[in-house]
Amino acid sequence: MIKLEARPTPSKFWTYASPLLALLMTVVIGVLLFMLLGKDPVKGLGVFFWEPIKSANALSELMVKATPLLIIALGLSVCFRSNVWNIGAEGQFVMGAVAAGGVALLAEKDTGPWIIPAILLAGVLGGMVWGGLTALLRDRFNASEILVSLMLVYVADMVLSYLVFGPWKDPNGYNFPQTKTFEAVTQIPRLMEGSRVNVGIVLAALGVLALWLFLFRTYAGFKQEVSGLAPAAARYAGFSSRRALWVALLVSGGAAGLAGALEVAGPIGQLTPYVPAGYGFAAIIVAFVGRLHPVGVVFSALLMSMFYIGGELAQSRLGLPKSLTGVFQGLLLFNLLACDTLMAYRIRFIKPVVMTPKGAN
Amino acid sequence: MDSMALLLAATLSAGTVLAIAALGLLINEKAGVVNLGAEGMMLCAAIAGFATVVHTGNTWLGFAAGMVAGALLAAVFGVLVIWLNTNQYATGLALSLFGAGFSAFLGIKYVQEKLPEQTQYVLPFLSDIPFLGVAFFRQHPMVYIAVCIAAGLIWFLGSTRAGLVLRSVGESPESAHALGYPVRRIRLAAVVAGGALCGLAGAYVSVIYTPLWVEGMIAGKGWIALALTTFATWRPARVLLGAYLFGGVTMLQFHLQGVGVSVPPQFLTMLPYLATIVVLVLISRNPLWIRVNMPTSIGKPFYPGS
């Protein structure tokens, strides 16, 4: 019989080993899946784990996809650490993209470069408003933030759809549901010639630093975490749980909105119904796999970005559906949660004890 | 008048999906387990049911396949949260994300497929009653089955020993354990039953309600069903009523589009989601209302001897 025995303190070893074990399990399941589909597993693993890192060009694409995931996951780490279950980052991402797109559409040919900070600010505000809406309903009316934030994803998608099919549709766009391509001046500056990596990655790196400082070096960060881990202790200490709720949702909403702004004014360059790419949902996995730690999420964002690129390559090279990405992402989170048990518990194999009542013989 | 009857009929059909799923979720929530994976289970069940009907032509086999798919996924979820003590919210979320990807992956071959012609179900005599006949008695049997499930649950939870044990496991697992009930196995059974019903609802969507398969076709119905259990304060009869109310909101958008109301269609599509938020706000603003009815140990893990 297997029994779980609680450890007195969480295992340091498994804190780091569990994500790796989870990744290993995901890879093993992946190999089995490829074999089941009659594909060469070596080739299959190659498109996921080797192709995305094998050249400078591939690496730069890896960064491009990792940037929004990282930015959103940083915000979500604050959220989940404070026990606020914002699962609607996708909606906040879309509203950030909409707000940023709205500002970008205002730009003319001779607009100055000040438009870029304005676009990014609009994105942050758009995401904050959407996250704040969830906070308001939770704070004022006690409505579950899980369900409200998720419902708002569908609403945000519809707002975007309305704008690109209606008032913001490009009049010269042959009736395609998309806005006109933004003016060149709105393009988020790239870091170097010939690569799509842009300033977003610098902002993401600053975000990592900011989150690390906030969580581990400020009193506000400490209060934030206590209110999540031990609400009763937080109340006793006079830390406001309402404040923690608002901070969590405004920060994560703002981060998701910023990611949305960077996407539409960066790689995409216009608003289309295809702006929502599932980054908001994938970032939830990034946050958990990265242990809600600012440095951890950097690695998990890169890993998840590999899954995205691998999925696209699996489609073009192996003729497998792109949705393989989602399968692997979901599996990874499942495996991680299972492996995390080893952090708090020790597995003991014990022989079942047959109890005989005293004096029975 | 006739269009009203048709609207009513469509409302019942739409409500049935939500009712079956939410009644399933009610079972596991009564036992103290929240399964946020409803959306994922319904998606996988939808493709399982759809594929089965494409290959066999038998609708009922499709429903069975959906139930099996839902139950299997729920069992995985159950083992993780009940035996490995993983966080219920995170695990359910993982199930939803995995289900969305997995169903899209499996379903890629079925995107263009069509189902065989559906049987028209007409109750003799009753369906000839003007208005009422069209509205109530020309429905797919699943519509009546949903009502039966609700009635069965009211009886099971309220009047049987087994129902009492199930509720005690959700209210105070420690006491149930002390009395010698296998708390974890009961919770697993409740989770599997909930998954099977979510699966049935998912299969109903792809086989009867909108007989086709598209990626992500459940479109949040699993999440709305989750909201419904809160909205209904964990009572089966209210779940049923709530489901029809939401079914009505969903159908209203098509009705309004039909009569040519000049509102952009996107705003009409938003309606069910906005309605969910509004209802959640209305019902949650009175904390007492929720707390009195909520299973006390909902969302809390139980590990005997810890």
Image: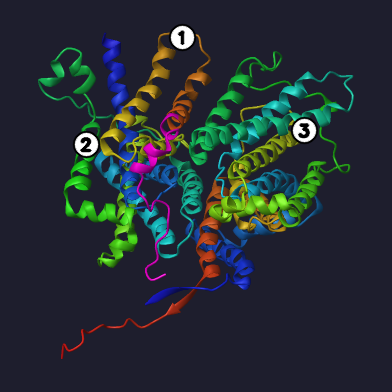
Mark 1 = which residue? Answer: B261
Structural distance between the alpha carbons of marks 1 and 2: 35 Å
Displayed quadrant of residue A190: top right
Image point (33%, 60%), residue name = B173
Task: Tell me the colour scheme of the image.
Answer: rainbow
Q: Secondary structure at mark 1?
A: loop
For disc 2, the chain is: B
| Mark 1 neighbour density, 10 Å: few (under 14) some (14–19) many (20 or more) | few
| Mark 3 neighbour density, 10 Å: few (under 14) some (14–19) many (20 or more) | many
Q: Amino acid at mark 2?
A: Ile
Structural distance between the alpha carbons of marks 2 and 3: 53 Å
Mark 3 = which residue? Answer: A120
Image point (79%, 46%), residue name = A201
Magenta stretch bounds: B282-306
Q: Is A39 on the left-hand or right-hand side of B255?
A: right
Mark 2 = which residue? Answer: B145
Whether residue B226 can be seen here: yes
Q: Is A1 on the left-hand or right-hand side of A44?
A: left
For disc 1, the chain is: B
Vertical position of residue A262 compared to residue B101: above or below: above
